[in-house]
């Protein structure tokens, strides 16, 4: 045998076996392609409850006040001034810092007790109401950030400072890929109807920071090129492409053996994976094999590529194909103004499809091993931004408490956690910092957040940062 | 803590060098190389520099701490040199009882047996402590003795070879000339050599042919571009502000300055001093002010709601972080919130450094609307040359003259326009659509849907995009829908069409329009599914506000009716393809009134169009000339050159040259550093929080670094950094240059020379390089020349399995380095080989191809005065500039660059990854830039190389080497097969040959051209093509 190939096989077998011993399972090509990945990864540290995550990120800051964190007494507090004792010394954004008055605005839509445990969910989310027994609503989420950029960077990368690795990149780094034709971490974007454009988002939210860049999320877009440059150039048939790649592989192989280049061998495999992706991705995004009832379940927008609903369905299809982490970003939750008008539209965008995804995963037996997260970077103030009752009024950013729900993946269903005050303003019991959330997500995938680290610029970096973080055991099954 | 002591340096340095080179073979345990890394990794978290986390008052990072007596029993000591048994330190790391054992189990840093042995042996050998290696000033070390003297080309080789010989490794033979010239070109210019360059070098029989080649390449103007690519990552250069809105800025003049500085070989100390403090130099020139843009390249925010004071702290913190990583090789960032856990950098040290950069007259919310944040400067590019100005003027004159000449394609255009005019209004029917909803997402004001299905806007925003949802209620509509018309009505009382202030009173400006249609309603236009627009016409024709302007999404142009009162006006959009009625039950139209000054319409309605638009964009005299046929031929020729698609390449060429002339001759804006009249006080911020200041500090540097005078300025800091005796700056710099040429640094953590950074593989070589760099007056070209003249650099990169196993990372350099080209050079190479590359130096950034919608789907498009929210592709030569000129948007960087590991440039990047992924394959195979390069390369081969030599020449042009027989046969077979495919289906040939904007330059023989395009693409995809061997 060619000595270089023998060398490559040894290396591959070594990493392969090393992985199996740690219980990761089939690594196959990923191990061959990314030997340093398998070498450097450190998880899972214990038996995982979940194997995959679908993160339905609601970008902009959904109003926990209007949607989940309801107190009947708020109807009486409506139009009263928010007491200074409640506001305390809180930092306010530049948007409302000069406001003379901070009048309380009770939710303007009916709220309903749902599920066996009677948790409050707004009538703006009728479908979500029907999955109350399947989800765990955390009402005591906390972040220190009060503006979009730092806040959304914080929850996604564990730091308000720029340059850290995102949750998905950490998962890809720590656990590797479970399939040979698709990336381990896929990102899907959709625009909100309530507010378009919503607050901008950025590549760094799915970036790899100090981890190798192959762990960054791959953006899948609707249209002929779901993955950038996926399609062969015009005029080139699949047969032509295949024959050209065969020649390419043969020439690369010869050169690799001649000069001793393992990187070239890895490149041959990368080209083969690219070729397979060219079939696997269109197969993934082609919904024609979905029966009518699935579109009925996810709602009419699920037929429209690029919509939040279509992305939810796409997420399920990816989970079925072994993608480790699918993250949707739905923009437009930043209701500073015209909340009355914008919020119902935002809710309409996401409600049916989010609930459908949970139901669909459940009936397919996928929910047990799939952790679904629904939430944004912070909540919104109970007080009015702008004059009370004015059609252009809304709510400002609020990080001291906000709501988020999770389902499946070993999270306690039909449960609510954390308590805030009457103003849905401060956490009274069981605060869950976004660090704790991230530690919990990692934990469910079998990773100890303190042990999944990478050394960079002299520090052992981890997703949860330098401050202490705790797995929220109370919400685990 | 005294880490800094000049008197003891001589002997220490010697020990250091010896220890470093011998550490594998020798039983002598060296503190810096063997002991300190174990302590830093395992012990410093609790017994290191950070007093807040220090346990048991025990410091293992200082000399005093290691030899101190125990807190609880002062008769005993942490370490008793030479006596492990009496050393508490040894007892604790070996104690079997978990409660006594160090590190404790919860720290999850258990020492390995060999680590314990090393530490114990070190204590037994006398526990000699040394200052951290990188803080000992470098001195020119003696050259190590080597056996194979004949292999040695210069001093570098002594150090490399000595180590190889000790490890029993042989250096590799010298690479062949073809490999060498390609390596040199790619390393020093980022561009490949031409076939002619390669052949000339192979034939050059002079004994010093190699040196001649090196000198020639170092003198190339592309050297400065290549070095700038390296420097832009460090300086986090970008064309946008970053953070969330990420609007455009103008910093390319600073980039021009960098390219120029490298090309004139500005001594590196001046290079740094001018960038850090050029504004403070006596009688500073504009160029010296321009250089200070280095520390304005950081991100800047104008996000509403952010707090200016907090933003300012972020900006200064970025300068501190970048200064630390780029010049000192130290990570200061941690100390923003607390004392550093691993390096002796205190929070006070951090804020003293912070103080140097804190007195800039800048604003906490600034830089919106495409206008640079203050302080700023308008000045001329240092790259402008008289020769280029004259050339551009001459080229312009020539091109302009062409517009006076008849063109053979003018007839086609006239025919088309005439037939369009003839068809105007054919079968035209308009069907009102019922507006159901109107939204203006980021404005409190909005429009109201009227009972008649129109939309009224009574309270306009300063600028706003309105999304109108429409229901198709036309029952008699049975044919296809060919487009939409938007009719604007005058206000019933005032008679005005718009709300405009400023230059357009009572008017409005539509800056862009987007349409979606579907079987389902949508409140918004989804940028993924907007309908293509073939034509836009309007009821009013005005040269400054042409209807076609709405096809350009940017805010700076648009359509406006004139006069804007009295009668209705309309805008008509014709779709690329007629729309099936069944696909169009609902429309959503986004009307963007983005010009500002409340230039928003008052009342409008949307109608669906059947048949052909009755509008035209041609002024009536032109219509007249066309229809009458008699026409004014001068007028028609002029309009042909102004409007015809056939004349577009000429128009683009003229516009690009006109812009270039302005770039070369007029001042342009850039951001600079300056100093506030009254120094801004700096205070330590508790936990780094901007609103929790505690003690005041003055500018200064850590005590364990060389001393600096009181009341130091930013200029003093810069000069201190570049002082010949500074132990860090020169080492850090030469290490980065080494990394650039050898793929990995002598210190692999190029940004971290601190306690947890890697140790140098060849410490004496690093010192030799640094000391030599300083001695030559920081002569960058000389330093690089020394590196590439070495036998070490010239080695073949061929690797044997034995060597791959023994030294997979090639740390010892028993072979030449081999690594994948970086993102920019992969694209540049394809452009160069294909002949598409436009070799202009400097100037504003350009926008080559990128998939549509990438910016819009993440940006604040339609809702902000910021620029760079929507991508508009450039034309002509701007598609073929080197990649370092590609417009860099931080929140959505060029995708083809990102795939090849380019950083986002949000923060300073000292080392790029070098990965190998399927997405890279997709870019090289399918990105139009590479397909077009393949097509152009094929055209070049067909037109300039004789048929019998083509395969060899093509292979040589891409890889630098001659193909062997097997390669040649394979390519010939591929070519023949592809030719058969395309001959059988010429439409396919035409399709592949239509990719890209460059004029097709079609060979008469389409199948041959297409087949060669496939072969060229195969060559561009070879692993060795994107590898520098």
Image (tube, helix red, strand yellow):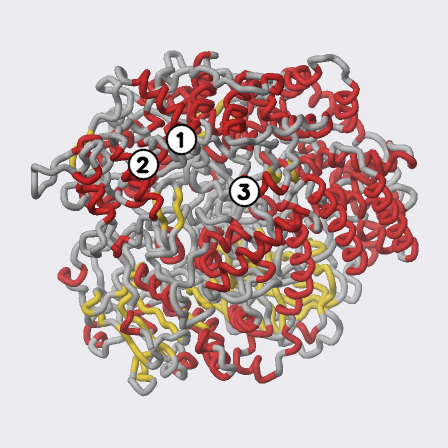
Q: Earlier in the sequence, mark 2 or mark 3?
A: 2
Pinpoint residue A377: horizontal percent, then vertical percent.
Answer: 36, 60
**Image height check: is B648 above or below A181?**
above
Q: Residue B285, can we see it? A: no
Quarter of the image with the N terminus of chain B is top left
Pinpoint residue B130: horizontal percent, then vertical percent.
Answer: 28, 27
Q: Nearer the viewer, residue B373 or B414?
A: B373
Q: Residue at x 54, y 31 (%)?
A: B168
* Residue at the spot of label 2: B35
Specify the subunit that label 1 lies on: B
Q: Regarding mark 1 in the picture, which secondary structure is present there? A: loop
Q: Regarding mark 3 in the picture, which secondary structure is present there? A: loop
Neighbour class for label 1 at 10 Å: few (<14), some, many (≥20)? few
Q: Left of A340 or right of it: where is B574?
A: right
Q: Residue at x 29, y 28 (%)?
A: B359
Q: Earlier in the sequence, mark 1 or mark 3?
A: 1
Specify the subunit that label 3 lies on: B
Q: Left of B803 or right of it: where is A162?
A: left
Q: Quadrant of residue B822?
A: top right
Specify the subunit that label 2 lies on: B
* Residue at the spot of label 1: B26
Closer mark to the observer between disc 2 and disc 3 = 2
The alpha-carbon separation of the residues under discs 1 and 3 comes to 41 Å
Q: Left of B617 or right of it: where is B39?
A: left
* Residue at the spot of label 3: B902
Pinpoint residue B19: horizontal percent, then vertical percent.
Answer: 38, 27
């Amino acid at each position: 045998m060619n000595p270089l190939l023998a060398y490559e096989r040894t290396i591959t077998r070594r990493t392969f076996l090393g992985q199996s011993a740690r219980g990761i399972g089939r690594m196959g090509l990923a191990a061959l392609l990314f030997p340093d990945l398998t070498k450097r990864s450190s998880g899972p540290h214990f038996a995982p409850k979940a194997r995959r995550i679908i993160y339905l990120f609601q970008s902009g800051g959904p109003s926990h006040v209007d949607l989940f964190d309801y107190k009947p007494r708020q109807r009486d507090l409506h139009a009263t001034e928010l007491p200074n004792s409640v506001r305390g010394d809180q930092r306010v954004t530049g948007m409302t810092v000069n406001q003379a008055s901070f009048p309380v605005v009770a939710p303007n839509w009916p709220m309903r007790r749902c599920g066996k445990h009677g948790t409050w969910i707004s009538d703006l989310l009728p479908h979500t109401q029907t999955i109350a027994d399947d989800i765990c609503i955390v009402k005591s989420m906390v972040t220190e950030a009060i503006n979009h950029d730092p806040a959304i960077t914080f929850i996604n990368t564990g730091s308000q400072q720029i340059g850290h690795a995102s949750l998905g990149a950490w998962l890809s780094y720590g656990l590797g890929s479970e399939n040979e034709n698709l990336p381990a971490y896929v990102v899907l974007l959709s625009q909100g109807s309530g507010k378009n454009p919503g607050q901008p988002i950025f590549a760094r939210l799915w970036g790899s920071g100090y981890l190798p860049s192959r762990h960054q999320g791959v953006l899948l877009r609707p249209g002929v090129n779901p993955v950038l440059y996926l399609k062969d150039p015009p005029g080139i048939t699949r047969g032509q492409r295949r024959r050209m790649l065969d020649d390419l592989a043969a020439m690369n192989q010869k050169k690799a053996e001649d000069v001793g280049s393992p990187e070239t061998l890895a490149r041959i495999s990368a080209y083969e994976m690219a070729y397979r992706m060219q079939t696997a991705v269109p197969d993934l995004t082609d919904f024609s094999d979905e029966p009518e009832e699935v579109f009925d379940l996810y709602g009419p927008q699920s037929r429209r590529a690029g919509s939040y609903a279509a992305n939810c369905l796409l997420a399920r299809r990816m989970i079925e194909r072994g993608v480790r982490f699918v993250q949707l970003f739905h923009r437009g939750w930043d209701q500073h103004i015209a909340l009355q008008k914008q919020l119902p539209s935002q809710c309409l965008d996401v409600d049916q499809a989010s609930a459908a995804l949970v139901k669909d995963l459940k009936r397919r037996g996928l929910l047990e091993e799939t952790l679904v997260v629904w939430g944004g970077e912070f909540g919104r103030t109970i007080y009015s931004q702008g004059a009370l009752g004015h059609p252009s009024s809304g709510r400002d950013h609020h990080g001291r408490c906000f709501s988020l729900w999770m389902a499946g993946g070993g999270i306690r269903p039909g449960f609510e956690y954390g308590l805030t005050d009457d103003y849905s303003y401060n956490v009274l019991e069981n605060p869950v910092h976004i660090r704790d959330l991230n530690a919990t997500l990692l934990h469910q995938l079998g990773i100890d957040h303190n042990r999944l680290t990478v050394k960079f610029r002299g520090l052992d970096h981890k997703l949860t940062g330098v401050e202490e973080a705790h797995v929220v055991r109370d919400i685990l099954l | 803590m005294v880490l800094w002591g000049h008197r003891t340096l001589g002997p220490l340095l010697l020990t250091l060098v010896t220890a470093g080179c011998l550490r594998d073979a020798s039983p002598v345990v060296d503190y810096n190389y063997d002991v300190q890394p174990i302590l830093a990794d395992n012990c410093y978290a609790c017994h290191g520099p950070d007093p807040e986390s220090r346990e048991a008052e025990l410091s293992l990072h200082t000399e005093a701490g290691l030899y101190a007596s125990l807190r609880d029993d002062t008769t005993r000591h942490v370490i008793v040199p030479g006596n492990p048994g009496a050393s508490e330190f040894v007892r604790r790391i070996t104690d079997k009882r978990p409660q006594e054992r160090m590190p404790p189990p919860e720290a999850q840093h258990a020492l390995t047996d060999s680590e314990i042995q090393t530490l114990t042996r070190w204590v037994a050998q006398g526990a000699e402590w040394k200052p951290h290696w990188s803080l000992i000033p470098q001195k020119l070390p003696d050259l190590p003795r080597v056996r194979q003297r004949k292999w040695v080309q210069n001093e570098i080789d002594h150090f490399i070879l000595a180590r190889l010989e000790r490890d029993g490794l042989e250096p590799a033979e010298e690479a062949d000339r073809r490999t060498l010239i390609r390596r040199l070109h790619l390393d020093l210019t980022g561009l490949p050599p031409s076939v002619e360059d390669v052949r000339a070098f192979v034939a050059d029989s002079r004994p010093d042919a190699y040196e001649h080649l090196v000198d020639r390449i170092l003198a190339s103007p592309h050297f400065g571009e290549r070095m700038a690519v390296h420097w832009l990552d460090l300086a986090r250069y970008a064309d946008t502000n970053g953070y969330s809105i990420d609007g455009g800025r103008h910093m390319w003049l600073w980039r021009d300055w960098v390219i120029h500085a490298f090309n004139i070989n500005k001594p590196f100390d001046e290079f740094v001093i001018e960038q850090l403090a050029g504004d403070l130099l006596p009688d500073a020139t504009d160029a010296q002010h321009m250089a200070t843009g280095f520390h304005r390249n950081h991100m800047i925010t104008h996000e509403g709601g952010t707090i200016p004071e907090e933003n300012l702290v972020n900006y200064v913190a970025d300068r501190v972080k970048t200064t630390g990583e780029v010049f000192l090789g130290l990570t200061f960032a941690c100390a923003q919130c607390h004392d550093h856990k691993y390096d002796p950098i205190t929070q006070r040290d951090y804020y003293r450094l912070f103080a140097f950069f804190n007195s800039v007259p800048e604003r906490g919310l600034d830089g919106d609307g495409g206008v640079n944040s203050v302080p700023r400067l308008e000045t001329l590019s240092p790259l402008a040359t008289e020769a280029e100005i004259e050339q551009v003027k001459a080229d312009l004159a020539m091109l302009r003259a062409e517009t006076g000449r008849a063109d053979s394609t003018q007839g086609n255009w006239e025919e088309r326009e005439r037939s369009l005019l003839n068809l105007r209004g054919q079968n035209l029917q308009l069907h009102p659509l019922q507006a159901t909803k109107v939204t203006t997402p980021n404005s409190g004001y909005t429009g109201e849907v009227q009972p008649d299905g129109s939309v009224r806007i009574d309270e306009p925003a300063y600028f706003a995009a309105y999304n109108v949802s429409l229901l198709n209620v036309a029952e008699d509509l049975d044919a296809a829908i060919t487009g939409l018309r938007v009719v604007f009505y005058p206000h019933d009382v005032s008679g005005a069409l718009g709300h405009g202030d400023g230059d357009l009173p009572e008017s409005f400006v539509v800056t862009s329009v987007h349409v979606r249609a579907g079987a389902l309603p949508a409140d918004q236009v989804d940028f993924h599914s907007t309908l293509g627009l073939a034509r836009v016409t309007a009821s009013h024709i005005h040269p400054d506000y042409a209807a076609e302007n709405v096809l350009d999404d940017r805010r700076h142009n648009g359509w406006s009716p004139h006069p804007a009162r009295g009668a209705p006006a309309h805008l008509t959009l014709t779709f690329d393809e007629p729309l099936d009625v069944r696909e169009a039950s609902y429309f959503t139209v986004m009307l963007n009134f983005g010009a500002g000054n409340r230039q928003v319409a008052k009342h409008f309605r949307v109608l669906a169009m059947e048949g052909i638009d009755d509008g035209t964009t041609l002024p009536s005299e032109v219509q007249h000339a066309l229809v009458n046929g008699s026409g004014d031929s001068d007028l028609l020729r002029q309009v042909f050159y102004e409007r015809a698609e056939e004349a577009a390449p000429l128009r683009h060429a003229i516009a690009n040259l006109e812009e270039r002339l302005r770039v070369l001759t007029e001042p342009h804006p850039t951001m600079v550093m300056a100093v506030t009249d009254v120094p801004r006080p700096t205070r330590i911020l508790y936990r780094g929080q901007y609103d929790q200041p505690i003690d005041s500090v003055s500018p200064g540097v850590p005590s364990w670094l060389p001393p600096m005078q009181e009341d130091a300025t930013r200029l003093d800091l810069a000069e201190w950094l570049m002082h010949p005796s500074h132990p860090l700056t020169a080492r850090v710099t030469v290490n980065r240059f080494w990394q650039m040429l050898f793929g990995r640094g002598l210190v692999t953590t190029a940004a971290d020379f601190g306690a947890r950074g890697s140790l140098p593989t060849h410490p004496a070589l690093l010192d030799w390089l640094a000391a030599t760099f300083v001695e030559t007056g920081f002569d960058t070209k000389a330093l690089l020349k020394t590196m590439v003249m070495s036998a070490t650099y010239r080695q073949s990169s061929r690797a044997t399995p034995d060597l791959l196993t023994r030294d997979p990372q090639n740390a010892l350099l028993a072979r030449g380095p081999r690594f994948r080209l970086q993102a920019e050079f992969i694209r540049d190479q394809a452009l160069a080989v294909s002949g598409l590359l436009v070799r202009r130096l400097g100037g504003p950034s350009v926008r080559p191809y990128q998939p549509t919608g990438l910016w819009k789907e993440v940006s604040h498009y339609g809702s902000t005065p910021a620029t760079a929210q929507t991508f508009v592709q450039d034309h002509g030569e701007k598609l073929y500039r080197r990649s370092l000129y590609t417009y860099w948007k931080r929140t959505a960087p060029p995708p083809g660059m990102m795939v090849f590991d380019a950083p986002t440039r949000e923060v300073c990047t000292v080392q790029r990854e070098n990965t190998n992924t399927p997405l890279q394959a997709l870019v090289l195979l399918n990105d139009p830039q590479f397909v077009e390069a393949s097509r152009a390369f094929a055209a070049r081969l067909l037109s300039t190389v004789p048929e019998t030599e083509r395969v060899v020449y093509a292979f040589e042009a891409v890889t630098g080497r001659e193909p062997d027989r097997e390669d040649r046969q394979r390519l010939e077979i591929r070519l023949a097969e592809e030719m058969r495919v395309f001959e059988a289906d010429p439409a396919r040939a035409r399709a592949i040959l239509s990719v890209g904007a460059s004029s097709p330059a079609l060979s008469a023989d389409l199948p041959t051209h297409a087949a060669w395009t496939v072969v060229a693409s195969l060559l561009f995809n070879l692993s060795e093509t994107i590898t520098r061997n």
